[in-house]
Amino acid sequence: MPDDLTPIRRQYLQLKQKYPDAILFFRLGDFYETFDEDAHLVHRELELTLTSRPVAKGERVPMAGVPHHAAENYIGRLIAKGYRVAICEQVGTQAVKGLFPREVVRIVTPGTVIEPGMVPEARNNYLAAVLVHDTQAGLAYADITTGEFATTQLDAASLSQELARLQPAEVVVVESKEPGGELRLPDLGGRSFAVTPWPGWRFDHGNARQALLAHFRVATLAGFGCDQLPLAVRAAGALLQYLESAQPGSLAQLTQLHTYSPAEYMLLDPATRRNLELTETIRNPRGAQGSLLGVLDATVTPMGARLLRQRVNQPLLDLTHLEARLDRVEAFVRDTPLRAETAARLKGLPDLERLTNRVVGGTAGPRELVAMRRALEALPGLIDVLARGAAGSLGPVIRALDPLVDVAGLLAQAVADEPPAAVDKPGAIRPGFSEELDGVVAASRGAREWIAGLEARERERTGIRSLRVGYNKVFGYYIEVSHAQSERVPDDYIRKQTLTNGERYVTPDLKEYETLVLNAEEQLVEIERRIFREVCAQVAAQSSRLLNVARALAALDVYAALATAAVRNHYVRPVLTQDDVLDVRGGRHPVVELALQGVRFVPNDVHFDGRSRGGEGDARPAGAGSGERIHILTGPNMSGKSTFLRQVALIVLMAQIGSYVPAEAATIGLVDRIFTRIGAQDDIAAGQSTFMVEMVETAYILAHSSPGSLIVLDEVGRGTSTYDGIAIARALVEYLHNNPRLNCRTLFATHYHELIELEQLLPRCRNYNVAVAEEEGHVVFLHRVVPGGADRSYGIHVAQLAGLPKAVINRATEVLVELEASHRAGGAVPADSAEMSAQLPLFDLEPHPVVKALQVLEVDEMSPLEALTKLYELRKMAK
């Protein structure tokens, strides 16, 4: 470091060296300044003016700054872009060799933001830590604004599902020094998060375990349920150490560690979440409008909005818990006055969950305590409403609504109704709460009153009518007398300042009262700050009670919101069962039906036969002898096939979050997983074409589905040549039907009409199509799903609707007629129409299906059950 650097430059470089990966906001007076590369970065990202500052003889460096009172907005914009910001403040009031000491007091990262204006109200702001070892992974996550802290150990293949559910703002991973050794986190459907490398030793089991033991002040982790889950411990401990480094004040909020298993919930991979548009749409990955959440979210509190989002992202598999949720929704559905009054009393309530955590973390201000008091004062009235009208199903939630009379009383007595935003000005503490504070206020008021009356008293005492009392910032209070009246000045006057026309004096009494007045505000601020901290400490001691109430309010808000959506949109309560039946009558797409303004949505049925689970001792292949397990859905483009596929999946998912469903009636066997393969996606960065992505997703489905899964496939095989596509599609259907590990409920939409022959070959496969009506050459889409297969795609008709030139439409019609005529006559296909020849039926040009099946049969690799199943199918095919 050069010798001629200015002291402030030297101080800056020393601090920047400690935080090279963060943008250093360096406090200088009323501004936070950035220098060097940081200045260029914020100039580019925030569009700030770039200036310069001399740092040595003949040397200047780039500089860009923001006012300290507006820094939150600028920091928030940087955090949203994934940057880290180190905030450097002046510490102490004594300069050392003319330079005030400065320290980095906090590192703001996307996952450690706590300012209300920088975190979204309706969603959690998660910080996650992950590590992968062999086939297992450890995952921990926390939201320091709500105090949520959880960890799990899971299959590495399931890590992407959990990250897709959480949508964390930041993920801490093991730092790798080897090229290419970094953990490549999965694509989460267009959403990205900041990835922060963290030294590997922080993830060591010993360090991580000790960090958890020390934080929770326990001797064992057995009580948290993770003692025998080493990867879960390592992830949670690393996350805790990261918070201690970046945001140490947040550790007080993490009072519990929840260990969970993903097996308790329906797993949803990122592709399924994207295709079903659960909480955001493909076109707008930052907004809920147009998503399932946008339809269901009638919540009126931030706490309720966050809880509903969590439930949509994490459907349950526990029938008892789901029935309890549905009972509570039904209580509000049946009692309209109760639902309306509950929503009215919840509406406008402050975010008690985040307010409590700000108090615990020491970042709450006086106005936030007023907001907390307002929330607590609303509790008795809400409890009375629920007690008068609620059914017994709401009992557990009502019992959790502790009125917290003691905390509300403390806040009412201690905090003024309209306090300043911070305790750096007097007025936060209510008069009458502290005798000490009231004494200082009274003394200050008395001193001001004494000084205000001094001029009249001194004129009376001295007889000097021109005498006046004034105040000067430099000299303080004074008594001014003109030179002409100087002989009448009393002996107790002490000369303070000589003017051209007179003299200024003070008296011992005036000096004493001046001290009281000038020091009163500083005293008031100091006393109020101490009292405020004491009040916050008393409130923080009741944080567990406050958080329990906050979560009960959130649950009530969710139940009332789901009931509102059910009544408003004419939903019904689903019948849930452990059998894997799926029987929906008059089902509708919850999002599409609301988007159809003035047009009636055409409802449709779906039916899969169920079989009781847990039938040990049954030697038959899973589902053997049962009815429909695979639906092959054909029909033209734009007829509603994709809408139908998605609506079935969404109805199942809604039932398993504890919601009513858009149908006339629904009996749903619990689904362990929903898989979807819909739409064309590529991954150019990974070198994967659209077809490769399609095949990778399909392979994942086949590897991870079970008899309890619901599979939704749309146009699998369309990304390659038609013969290849048909071959893949048929093999896929056969595999789903015949493999004893699968036999899951499957909806398979396709344009390959050749697949409808499978209904004659596979006993649990059924054909359905989306009906159309033809009138005078025009096609009308009826949007009704009916039994049977379609024999045409009506692709030329759809092309006409899309606006292709008439000449193209006419020529395509001619070519199609030629191809169909050529096929009927058994003739060759014109060479210039080779691509379109792929639309001809494939199976008529191949050997008998039994011969083909026998040719490719891998007898040595078949289990006895598979062999029996295959023999049964071959016999039916031969007939």
Image (tube, helix red, strand yellow):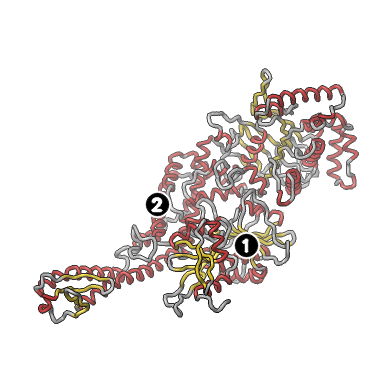
Using the image, determine if residue 221 lies above or below residue 652: below
Disc 2, SS: loop
Please state which amino acid type lies under the numbered disc 2. Ala
**Identity of the amino acid at label 1?**
Thr
Q: Residues within 10 Å of mark 1 (few under 14, many from 20)?
A: some
Q: Is residue 30 left or right of 278 when viewed as pictured?
A: left
Q: Which mark is residue 378?
A: 2
Q: How many marks?
A: 2
Q: Are marks 2 and 1 in contact (CB under 8 Å)?
A: no
Q: Work out whether residue 779 or residue 646 is closer to the camera in this orientation and state it.
A: 779
Question: Residue 751, image x and y in percent?
Answer: 74, 33
**Label 2 to label 1, Cα distance in Å?**
42 Å
* N-terminal label among 2 and 1: 1
Q: Is residue 299 left or right of residue 663?
A: left
Q: Secondary structure at mark 1?
A: strand
| Quarter occupied by residue 809 | top right
* Quadrant of res 625: top right
User: Along the line of sight, which residue is nearer the eye, 247 or 435?
Assistant: 247
User: Which of the two discs, 2 and 1, sits closer to the camera?
Assistant: 1
Give the residue at x 74% y 59%.
Answer: 135
For label 2, count other residues whose C-alpha is less than 10 Å away and answer few (under 14), some (14-19) or many (20+).
some
72 over 104 or under it: above or below: above
Q: Is residue 701 visible?
A: no
**Image location of residue 410, percent across then percent down:** 37, 62
Which quadrant: the N terminus? Answer: bottom right
- Across and down, in percent, residue 753 comes to 77, 30
Q: Which residue is mark 1?
A: 196
Identity of the residue furthest to the bottom in this view: 491
| Residue at the image position 46 percent from the left and 71 percent from the top | 90
Residue 307 vs residue 291, the one in the foreground = 291
Mark sitting on residue 599: none
On the rendered structure, is 12 left or right of 762? left
